[in-house]
Image (cartoon, coloured by chain):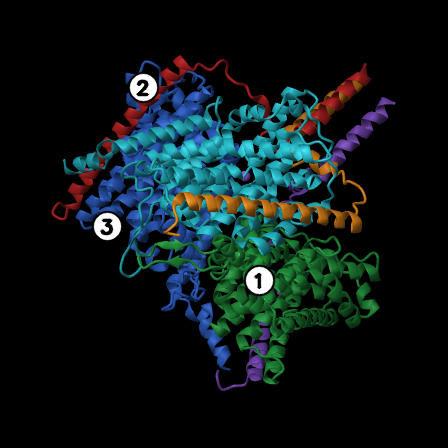
Chain colours: A blue, B green, C cyan, D orange, E purple, F red
Amino acid sequence: MHSLINLWHDSGLYQMEVGQLAMIIVGCLLLFLAIHPKFQFEPLLLLPIAVGTIFVNIPGAGFYAAPVIDAHGHVESPAGLLYYIYHAGIETGLFPLLIFMGVGAMTDFGPLLANPKTLLLGAAAQFGIFGTLFGAAALTDAGIMDFTMQQAAAIGIIGGADGPTSIFIASKLAPELLGAIAVAAYSYMALVPMIQPPIMKALTTKEERKIQMSQLREVSKAEKIIFPISLLVLVALLLPSAAPLLGMFCFGNLMKESGVVDRLSDTAQNALINVVTIFLGLGVGSKMSADKFLNADTLFILVLGMLAFCVGTAAGVLMAKAMNKMSKTPINPLIGSAGVSAVPMAARVSNKVGLDANPQNFLLMHAMGPNVAGVIGSAVAAGVMISFFG
Amino acid sequence: MHSLINLWHDSGLYQMEVGQLAMIIVGCLLLFLAIHPKFQFEPLLLLPIAVGTIFVNIPGAGFYAAPVIDAHGHVESPAGLLYYIYHAGIETGLFPLLIFMGVGAMTDFGPLLANPKTLLLGAAAQFGIFGTLFGAAALTDAGIMDFTMQQAAAIGIIGGADGPTSIFIASKLAPELLGAIAVAAYSYMALVPMIQPPIMKALTTKEERKIQMSQLREVSKAEKIIFPISLLVLVALLLPSAAPLLGMFCFGNLMKESGVVDRLSDTAQNALINVVTIFLGLGVGSKMSADKFLNADTLFILVLGMLAFCVGTAAGVLMAKAMNKMSKTPINPLIGSAGVSAVPMAARVSNKVGLDANPQNFLLMHAMGPNVAGVIGSAVAAGVMISFFG
Amino acid sequence: MHSLINLWHDSGLYQMEVGQLAMIIVGCLLLFLAIHPKFQFEPLLLLPIAVGTIFVNIPGAGFYAAPVIDAHGHVESPAGLLYYIYHAGIETGLFPLLIFMGVGAMTDFGPLLANPKTLLLGAAAQFGIFGTLFGAAALTDAGIMDFTMQQAAAIGIIGGADGPTSIFIASKLAPELLGAIAVAAYSYMALVPMIQPPIMKALTTKEERKIQMSQLREVSKAEKIIFPISLLVLVALLLPSAAPLLGMFCFGNLMKESGVVDRLSDTAQNALINVVTIFLGLGVGSKMSADKFLNADTLFILVLGMLAFCVGTAAGVLMAKAMNKMSKTPINPLIGSAGVSAVPMAARVSNKVGLDANPQNFLLMHAMGPNVAGVIGSAVAAGVMISFFG
Amino acid sequence: MSETSLVAQGLELMIFGMGVVFVFLTMLVFVTGFMSKLVNKFAPEPQPVPAPARAAAPQGVDPQLLKVLSAAVKEHRARQK
Amino acid sequence: MSETSLVAQGLELMIFGMGVVFVFLTMLVFVTGFMSKLVNKFAPEPQPVPAPARAAAPQGVDPQLLKVLSAAVKEHRARQK
Amino acid sequence: MSETSLVAQGLELMIFGMGVVFVFLTMLVFVTGFMSKLVNKFAPEPQPVPAPARAAAPQGVDPQLLKVLSAAVKEHRARQK
Ligand code: NA
Ligand code: NA
Ligand code: NA
């Protein structure tokens, strides 16, 4: 029958290209990494990304179909779900900015305010970003890889160890690499407990790892309220291109710390960020089509991203070592690695490696300072890139 | 005074056409059916639909006014609330898909996995859809009604007993009938406890109704996680046109069962589905204008929709009878009626009719299998229609 | 280096105009008024407005940049965050309407239903709106100010003491004044406890202030359900131009009072209104640019807005005095001031001034009637304006 | 509209607007009163619903509470001995 | 499609649609059964997870707690006597 | 930009970027320190706010319940005497 033939021609079995099949398997693999108790790699993002990956590679399902508009502006056939999500939330930058607001509303700057010097560790760890960017540019010049300067920058930002920043920058500078970059960023953030410790141990002596730090002072409510405003004003004066990311971050934090809009802060931390996370993940997945993901670039991105994490970690630790030598109060070099961000995983890693060296050594709160400084640092780096290429 | 005359000309009393007045009364009637303790017909949808019905029929209120854009693309006057809601969420299919995600996150496939054969009951009950579709086509050929093939299909889908599927298909195939179809679908879902029992009793013997079923086995967490993935892959391979509906359903269910993204699952089941439900209802109501609702078509839709429910119920029960005869383990034919979906109302009806025949006969969990199978079945039927007409 | 010069040219310090700097300081001042324990002026709105003010005045941050679309309709560079928020939610009127729905779902019409005469107090207090409108028109004719009729109306609506109504009307009639109008409206609503008491005391005798009112009767659930429907139908018949605002208000209230859609009502009162509040505030802030805010108009708006509050308060009190003289049951004139809306602040002020005169005099519930009547009254006034200018 | 002075327009809108507001709300007074009478005549409420359970326990049993509770029970048992 | 009568089209879509629905769900029966077998062979659940806390207190003040509470109160009173 | 090699551009962006990051965060160190000093000078916190009620009961333990509970405890103690 005619309609039976149509159906067969519509079916996935008939239409499926090998690349799509491979990407559906990649999607299932990501699901496995997100869900299996042994991995659970940042499931909040990786699960929706994986589902989006499967969706966009189903031939004929039209998840990323463009809308058909007739001459009068009427919709003949609507676009696919992922098309709307990508164009409304990722191309516009809205989703990463809303995530940043929510993360701001969950962030406690207390440890950072008690020891503002640790901001410098958050600065140093950004060498992961720029070193990798330089590496990608150099390897392209050497003919080994083939990236543009914009692509190199978008890959470097993986080293910021901050998912929304990576997505924000990649969607602006290199949307064709967005899928691979986001997957690399979130996967390596989940792998921080495996990536960082060897580097931290290689760069520090046992004596250094045993260093106990003096207890952090209490930070007043007023300081916590004024800090995000100061940061926002500083961004406005010095680096406006970083203002969207850091502005929303400060806004979220101000909602939390001011204590006068608890219901807004609550919603920013829960319902709103959850909804946006679902859509952000699906939208990122929509960029995981076979032609964009199954190529040498993805492999290079995975390698360079890993490198970025390692370099950032090393730079943070070395900076902390240097600061320990110059500072009057002792600074355990292990907290330097937390400067890459990956909040709060990296701070926990610092704490754990510290405890291994000295069971009395609780570094968690000390590492939270550089940890949130790393978020600021990579947002500043993002601002530099936007200004450079804008 | 001039402005007084203007005001009078702007007033509802001056502008109101009889059709609009009638539709406002219809809206109030729907409110009554949604709210009154004796009815409470699916109030979550019917109440917003009713309010949307009133809104769109207020002359001069502009709830469905199109926007006025000048030659430079600037908005001279914005559109009405319902215009935005309809075009953003219903025309695009976004709202039904998000509802499906939320419903997926609330669904427990356990009973189905414990007894997968009951999927066939969910298949049989879809005869309500296709039988009604055939009926509408035949009656049109006979000159009694006047529907296109697309309209006949959209009417048939009422028999799927699944609100979002009905809205999704109607908005694609016959948006002009959307209001009547949605109202019929939700009303009959609410009337399941009155529609189904007589049919169930007429088609079964007392002995059959007394059949006790063996207790369902425990289903492991791994099975529950892998099932939505399997279903998604099967849809991808066989029937991609059903992938949007079933994909979002599986996504929601996976968020729930994986247990690794509880905060997303929570939001999908609560804040997000609630927001979308409000808007979906208002948007459906926007199609309840006098010219689209007050005509013979609506009457035929109500009749055919009722027929679809009856036929689906009967087909499910007969299938269950047949399976009982062929199966080694006993199958109570009463669980067949739950195959129409209308979760969980239809399963409760199976249970109640079973208890009437045998006070020891608890069919609820056994009927939940065909009940959720019915959701899958009608989404598959929807996919067939999209493929047929697409 | 070249890029260093670029960065310097991109920096806020280089680009900042004096007006922008002044507006950032205004933003910080608004933050202070929103957050400091001595003020806490309507922080739910004022805090996001303040942040939006800072955002939009950061030179080069592009928060309000228009999108760049190429000839094929592809997005070359996306718009800024505040651009999307303003055009999607404020220009369209969606955000104020959703806020109204949420406020409706939080409103208890019980006290009003127990004593429907108090609706007239809500009517009288709207003289603040129209008196101010007339004042602005007269002062423009006298050459002192320079407003159009539309602007005069938008300024008058501040006297409605209802934030979303003010924003809804200002965005339609005078978007260029939106920032100043919204800030004035929310600030004076917060200042109600300081603005109203002197006027209330000046217009009443001590004896009048001591009047105790008879306890309100119990209102049945059915009345509470039917009231919003009646109001909606009355609006439909008499003043359709007020239907969007009052319709959404009634819809929200009906969701609450019907008791059959508690999950929707909950979401309307919490997640949804909170999300919209964040965006509404930011969007209003986007209109706080130096050229629109730093001029004589803003000063006049602040003066006229204050006048509107005072006139509305006085009109309410005088109406209550008159009603007390004509009514059989005693009416304390102090409840008249609550007719301006500013729910529930104005009702609390009535209660407090009453307690000052007579420690046994609890007016809170009696003042809640005129208080919610004031919301209806200003929405009706808004409808008149839309009809007049539409 | 272009002919008349702003002050005249303002006066018109003021009188007209206050008029509509009063007419509308006065009608609402009557409609509400009429509605209430009808309701109380044809559907008098049997009894004011108390619904205490729902008011007392709005959302979530928090672990803190359970801790407090179990501590109280333990203490109770200890004293009982 | 324009040639055939509506009733013929309806018949075709009916047969065709029911066919696809049955084929799809039948395949799902097999896939599900196969999947369950695989899972129970290679990843048998160590023990049926009871997870009573989560199941019992999904939202709201759960009845379980109220039961515990009232039981405690009863016990308390009983011992008091 | 088209003239210079990618590696030169990369080097420039690296040096330039790290420079900006360090300058910005160093300034933030000073601004933060200065701000903290000002705050602690002009608005020293009277006492570290304990805010135990809020911290302990972030959401959903309602005062009603606590009242009931403490009443129960009181009653219990009274009877115990
Ligand atoms: Na970072
Ligand atoms: Na169904
Ligand atoms: Na008002």
Give the x, y percent position of residue A330.
35, 16
Q: Name the one closer to the observer, A5 or B25.
A: B25
Q: Secondary structure at mark 2?
A: helix
- Which subunit holds the residue at mark 1? B
Is label 3 on the same chain as label 2? yes
Callout 1: 10 Å neighbours few (<14), some, many (20+)?
A: some
Residue denoted by label 1: B16
Q: Specify the amino acid type for callout 2.
A: Asn
Viewer-nearest of labels 1 and 2?
1
Is label 1 on the same chain as label 2? no
Residue denoted by label 3: A147
Viewer-nearest of labels 3 and 2?
3
Picture quadrant of residue A248 = top left
Q: Is residue B254 above or below residue C157?
A: below
Residue denoted by label 2: A324
Q: Specify the amino acid type for callout 1.
A: Met
Callout 3: 10 Å neighbours few (<14), some, many (20+)?
A: many
Give the x, y percent position of residue B199.
76, 70
Specify whether A258 is left or right of D47: left
Q: Name the one closer to the observer, C38 or C238.
A: C238
